[in-house]
Each structure stands twice: as C-alpha cells, then as structure tokens.
Amino acid sequence: MDDNVRGGDADATSTERVLKRKVKNSRTNLFEWVKYRCHLGDGFFLCECPTSFDNETVSLQVLLSNILSVHPKAASRFEIKHATPSGHSSDEFMAPTSQHCSLWAEEQLGILVRVEGVLKQLETENKLYLQRETQLRHELANLQDSMRLMDVERQELLTQLRDVTTEREEWKAMARRKQADMTQLRDDLQLARDEIRLLTNEQLRLHHRNKDLAVHVQRLDTLVYGKF
C-alpha cells in the first residue's frame, strides 16, 4: 500500500497514475484488483497492465468523447461508464488514496465538462453551417433560376438575330435585284436615247429630202405648166 501511495504521490503532478482496475480472471472466474498505468492522453483514456494478467484485460483505451459518466463508489474507488459499439460498459478503479480518487474523478468530470462544451460548440457550429448551407442552397437555386431565365432570353435573342439576319439577307438580295433592274433600265434608256437620236436624224434627213422633192416637183410643174 505504501508503494502505491508513493507511486501515486510521485505521479500526482502528471497525467499518468498507477491505479488498480477491477477485472475478472477468466481462469478463476473471480474479480481481482490489478495494477494499471492509467494515462490521460489527447482525446483518450488509456490503461495498460505492466504485467501479463489476462490477454483480454491487458489494456483498456477509451475515447474521452465516449465517456458517459464518472461515479465515486467509495473513498478511493470510482467507476467510469463509457459507450461501446454494442452499448455501454463500466470499469471500476481504485486509487492508492481517496485524494487520488477525488483528483481523478475531478479530472474526469473536468474532461467531461470540456468535452460537453466542445460538443455544444460543435453543435452550434453545425447548426450555423446547416443554416449557411440552406442559405447557399437557396442562393444556388436562385442563381440556377436566373441562369435558366438568361438561357431562355439568350435563345430568344438568338432566334431574333437569326430572323433579322434572314430578313437582312432578303433585303440585300432584293437590293441586288433592284440594282440589276436599275442597271438594265439605264441600258434600256440609253438605247432608247440612241434610237431617238437616230430617228431624229432620220426625220431631219427625210425632211430635207422632202424639201428637195418639193422643189423638184415645183420645178417640174413650172416646166410642164409653163409650156401650155
């Protein structure tokens, strides 16, 4: 017992303690108190047996987040209840002195309080993240609706652009036809002018010829009627 006390006093300022764990001997089917080196690590509670006692009870490792409760059972004994994949389990420990037991119980309770605080903080952050996710999903849905509307408008604009392009090509073709018609009219007009000029010249020539014929007829009349 003195060795346990001295060991406990030596470890009082550290996170590692020598405790006795109540375990069942598979050979005798009786409960025994076996010394374990218990260590509070970063996020876990580890107990290792310095001597080979039983293959099934050599070590115990429990996540701090899985510790459900710590209950004092006597002056120097306390029980840790923790969650397991199949439900929950309890392990009983005995400290060298009641002070060690109280110290470990307080440490465990402090850890549970810190873990509970962290879990509450995580729960709050998770709620905020869920709210933010909902908000982002709503914004994403609005953006998708806006993109769909923009796509519909773009399709309408493309249709209008195709219609305008088709109409422009039709107007261009019509303008080319009108230009060709105007060119043909100019050519026809020039031909008409040339024909008019030729006709005018022919009329002048015929007019002069008629005058000459009239003079010639008059002379003939004078000659004919002059004899009689």
Image (spheres, rainbow, N blue to C red):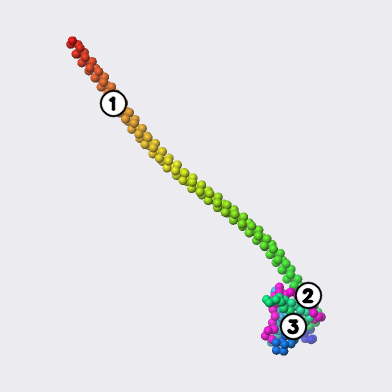
Residue linked to disc 1: 202
Dot placed on the residue nearer the N-terminal end, 2 or 3: 3
Residue 113 vertical position relative to residue 134 in the rendered view, above or below:
below
The label shown at residue 106 is 2
Residue 28 vertical position relative to residue 110 in the rendered view, above or below:
below
Which residue is located at x 20 percent, y 12 percent?
A: 225
Is residue 79 shown left or right of residue 218? right
Residue numbers of the magenta segment: 54-76
Position in image of residue 17 (x %, y %):
74, 80
In the image, what residue type sits under mark 1? Glu
Q: Nearer the viewer, mark 1 or mark 2?
A: 1
Position in image of residue 60 (x %, y %):
70, 80
Position in image of residue 61 (x %, y %):
69, 78
The label shown at residue 21 is 3
Dot placed on the residue nearer the N-terminal end, 1 or 2: 2
In terms of secondary structure, where does tag 1 sit? helix
